[in-house]
Image (cartoon, rainbow, N blue to C red):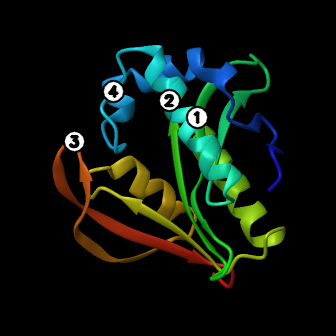
Amino acid sequence: MITELQTERLLLKKMEVSDSSSLFKIWSDPEVTMFMNINHFTDEKQAIQMIEVLEDLYQDNKAIRYSIFHLESKQIIGSCGYNSLDFENSKAEIGYEISKEYWGKGFASEAVRKLLDYAFNTLYFNRIEAKIEPENKKSIKLVKKMNFHYEGTLRKSEKSRDTFIDLDMYSRLITD
């Protein structure tokens, strides 16, 4: 897996423990984490632990998460990546979040576009999935704009904050 991807305005760089302070600021915002399967963080140690878990998944070739650096400011403005990689079936699940101060400026779209490009044109994956809580209207709007197709609702599919939640399944195929 390539550890750096670049767009016009962003550098997607494999997440490292040294990113924990910046990511903690993002993951401690309840509005940012509202639709993530975590509670907002209250201690930077939680960010370090999350990054370490993600590193283990990366080492096992099961996932990769990138810190999103804004090229102009050199600041980390979010994260994105492949929450699961399935090389046998040529598919991946993507996820992303952006710091609130950068919402509405096209950064999430730009990062997702790059993830799709890499998955389809370098990894030659057939399918990219996004599982989104039905109330997360901004994320649904983003994936629809990226030509993802709604496939249905996975009822009470995952546990989030000690409650089973529904997730809407969206996918995009290499042929879309």
- Taking the image as shown, residue 62 lies to the left or right of residue 152, namely right
- Near-viewer residue (119 or 162): 162
Mark 1: which secondary structure? helix
Q: Nearer the viewer, residue 64 or 112?
A: 64
Quadrant of the snapshot with the C terminus: bottom right
- In the rendered structure, which disc, 3 or 1, sits on the residue that comes first in sequence? 1
Q: Is residue 15 above or below residue 44?
A: below
For the residues labelled 1 and 2, say whether their Cβ atoms are less than 8 Å apart.
yes
Residue at disc 4, secondary structure: loop
- Comparing 8 with 37, the one in front is 37
Element on which disc 3 rests: loop
Mark 2 lies on a secondary structure that is: helix
Mark nearer the viewer, 3 or 1: 1
CA gap, disc 3 and disc 1: 21 Å
In the rendered structure, find residue 49 and report the number of the disc placed on it: 2
**Residue with the mark numbered 1:** 52
- Across and down, in percent, residue 75 comes to 69, 18
Q: Quadrant of residue 20?
A: top right
Q: Is residue 137 above or below residue 125?
A: above
Total number of numbered labels?
4
Q: Is 7 placed left or right of 84 in the picture? A: right
Q: Residues within 10 Å of mark 3 (few under 14, many from 20)?
A: few
**In the image, which disc is placed on residue 161?**
3
Up-down: is 171 above or below 10?
below
Residue 44 x %, y %: 47, 15
Question: Which residue type carries mark 1?
Answer: Glu
The answer to whether the residue labelled 3 contacts the one labelled 4, judged by CB atoms less than 8 Å apart, is no
Q: Is residue 105 visible?
A: no
Cα separation, mark 2 vs mark 4, equals: 14 Å
Q: Are marks 3 and 1 in contact (CB under 8 Å)?
A: no
Q: Earlier in the sequence, mark 2 or mark 3?
A: 2
